[in-house]
Image (tube, grey):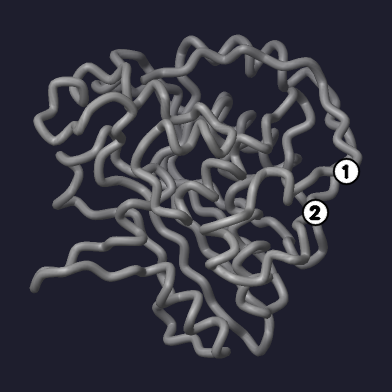
Amino acid sequence: MKQYLDLSQRIIDEGQWVANERTGKRCLTLINADLTYDVGNGEFPLVTTRKSYWKSAVAEMLGYLRGYDNAADFRALGTKTWDANANDNEAWLNNPYRKGVDDMGLCYGAIGRNFPKPDGGTIDLLRQIVDDLSAKKDNRGEILTFYHPGAFHMACLRPCMYSHHFSLLGDTLYLNSTQRSCDVPLGLNFNMVQVYFLLAIMAQITGNKPGKAYHKIVNAHIYEDQLELMRDVQLKREPFPAPTFHINPDIRSLEDLETWVTLDDFSVEGYQYHEPIAYPFSV
């Protein structure tokens, strides 16, 4: 929580204005931010200075792990985060690769579970990683990537948090997640939860202990129509103590995640928060 507030204040103090061509808005922008989440000690990074919808963040990551490419599938899990990008993005609506309503194209989990090979066919990156880590193996390249420049034209959006590199030291699993672009008022509270959740759930299904998750943000920004709410409202609030995140211990495999797991298998205890803030969302 403190890391989130410190980064927001740093953007306000040190950021530079940059015009964003995709949205037509200016962003107060900072290059390079590093956040750390101690998953092994249960330090759940849930924002408390406004209500944070952690269930939607978990549902989105669960959809990525399942390889979903349709906003309707994400809605069925419990999140509407892909509705706008799939259906309100003018460039995507006119894209010949769009298959119809709610289609997201070849992005995020759809890439990670079916990464195209130059010589034909695909690789299930997540399956390889789970198999290696379950066998207590680490080849120094256990990387789940959603980034494929050759497929950008076939998706509604380039991936923002695009790489998750797992490392095993003994029986302790670590994670380095890299994010090329981050809407700090809206997206970061989601992304922090997702990085924490990803390490916690991967450690559980591979039979390892979670260590720390390291979250690298390259371009951290606040949109011009978000600045006043962040500066004059959210940063004026005192944070509450961190809550605790729980995962159903019966989740033991990737197949469990793919089949029967729902949001009912996750819970947060002791979450105190300030009133919601309606930050504008830029498509």
Q: State which quarter of the image contains the N terminus.
A: top right
Q: CA distance from mark 2 to mark 1?
A: 8 Å
Apparent side of residue 40 relative to residue 137 in the rendered image (left or right)? right
Query: What's the residue at 62%, 12% (across, down)?
Result: 278
Residue 145, compared with residue 236, is above or below; it is: below
Residue 259, compared with residue 155, is above or below; it is: below
The residue where tag 1 is placed is 269
Would you identify the image quadrant in which residue 203 lies? bottom right
Q: Circle 2 — which element?
A: strand
The residue where tag 2 is placed is 246
Residue 249 x/y as whole percent: 77, 65
Q: Amino acid at mark 2?
A: His
Q: Residues within 10 Å of mark 2 (few under 14, many from 20)?
A: some
Residue 212, compared with residue 15, is above or below; it is: below
Query: What's the residue at 88%, 43% (across, down)?
Result: 269
Q: Using the rendered image of the protein, determine whether residue 19 is visible from the camera's viewpoint.
A: no
Q: Are marks 2 and 1 in contact (CB under 8 Å)?
A: yes
Residue 55 x/y as whole percent: 67, 37
Q: Amino acid at mark 1?
A: Glu
Query: What's the residue at 70%, 71% (across, down)?
Result: 211
Q: Using the rendered image of the protein, determine whether residue 60 is visible from the camera's viewpoint.
A: yes
- Identify which residue, 204 or 70, lies in the foreground: 70
Q: Residues within 10 Å of mark 1 (few under 14, many from 20)?
A: few
Query: What's the residue at 68%, 37% (across, down)?
Result: 54
- Identify which residue, 137 or 50, lies in the foreground: 137
Q: Circle 1 — which element?
A: strand
